[in-house]
Amino acid sequence: MFDYSRFYRIYTQHLRKYYEVSQQNLAKAIQIPNSSLSKIEAGKQEIDEKTFKKVIDFFEKIDEDFRFSFDPDLVEEVESWIRKSVHAFLMMTYESMAYEIKPILDNSKYLYSFAYFHIRLLQGLYDNFLDIDCMEQIKELIDSDYFQDHYHLAILYDLYGISVYSMNRKTLKIQNEALQTALGYCHTMETEDLRGLVLYHIIMNKKIARDFGPSLGYFEECENYLQKAGAYRRLIYSKLNKGNIYAELHLYNVAEQIFKSLENSQSQIDERDIIPQISECLSWYSLVQGKYQIALSYAKKSRKLGSNFPDIYLTLAYANYNLEDFNASRQSIKQFRETFSHDMRVVFINQFLVLLEKRMDQKPLPAPLIERLLNQLPDFRDVELEMILYPFLTAYYQSIEDYKNASMIQACWIQYFQFSQT
């Protein structure tokens, strides 16, 4: 049942702050004592419908574009879109749902109505569908203290936990705490779909934070709920993530079993992205184990399947380099530069390819470039360049009898292994 008095109170405070009207001026306009308005905004006093209509009348006079709708059915309309969007979020059908809810978000009748807080929640879902940073807006909605039921709070804290992609440790900690709060709300409800989604996001948060060991403890429960909810597309991605995490822990045999199981069941997978990703994973983890021919085979298969992942060219160039097929290595580097625009990830990868070219040309590796690349490694953890850069540089320094730098790089390599397994 819609709580009108709660809406009156919180929405009044929202309007006053939005239009930068003082409590004193608003209280005078709606003919109540300033102390009463102060108590209303603090939640210590109720505001009745008559007074609320005076608030609306005041703000409609100062803004000709603001026209509030008192239609109570608008709340249920937006609420139905929230539930549809959560389902789409779970099923990973983002594109079609974003297209459907855009007209709702663009219609001011919902924004200026009893559905105001619901439409802002729907906006948060929409922004996440399009990878738009909405962390601040979601935090404001949580802090408004409007939503009290566990279902909406679970959605809000889940969105807050994933509303921006960051590798900053402090941000990741804040996001993990939000996701754990969302999971806590899920435990009080019969919402297998939402619980599975939150668990999936907790795993992804820990994966980004490279907190690999603890993340494994969530997979069984997550996949169980995704299975029950019929979220098979997300379930497949969960299994792919599990394989990646085992590989990050250097348990390659376990990871390969997961990837090959997915590969063998690809006839059952109606998913354009997942099949090339399986080959991408098998390619990379074959490469870091020194299985260069196998790595090349999977890399070529991934490209044939339509992969546009820039990192696949690291495999093609480095595997051919180690197999001493320098022409093929150079050709892969050329294709990489012709295929991708110069975003930050591409520039980072290209720096290693420059070193690779220098080595094939039997030229000294530029010390400033090596230093820059080493300094950038923490900013591109998900590339995992450490797995090939460290052995590459160690071999180079040993070849020129620079054993001091070779030992330094080996120490970095050992430290990276220890860090990735903690």
Image (spheres, rainbow, N blue to C red):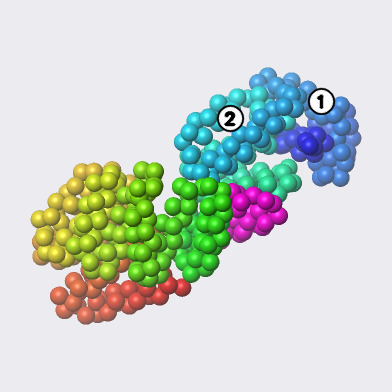
Left/right placement of residue 419 relative to residue 9 reads: left
Mark number for residue 2? none
Identify the residue under disc 1: 53
Identify the residue under disc 2: 105
Q: Which residues are magenta?
A: 171-195
Left/right placement of residue 38 relative to residue 294 reads: right
Front residue (pair 348, 226): 226
Label 2 vs 1, first from the N-terminus: 1
Residues at badges 2 and 1 in contact (C-beta under 8 Å)?
A: no
Q: Secondary structure at mark 2?
A: helix
Mark 2 is on which residue type?
Leu
**Residue 71 drawn at (x, y percent):** 74, 24
Q: Residue at x 27, y 64 (%)?
A: 286
Residue 335 lies in the magenta stretch: no
Q: Residue at x 27, y 46 (%)?
A: 305
Q: Residue at x 21, y 80 (%)?
A: 403
Residue 193 lies in the magenta stretch: yes
Mark 1 is on which residue type?
Lys
Magenta region, mostly helix, strand or loop? helix
Quadrant, the N terminus: top right
**Residue 119 drawn at (x, y percent):** 64, 34
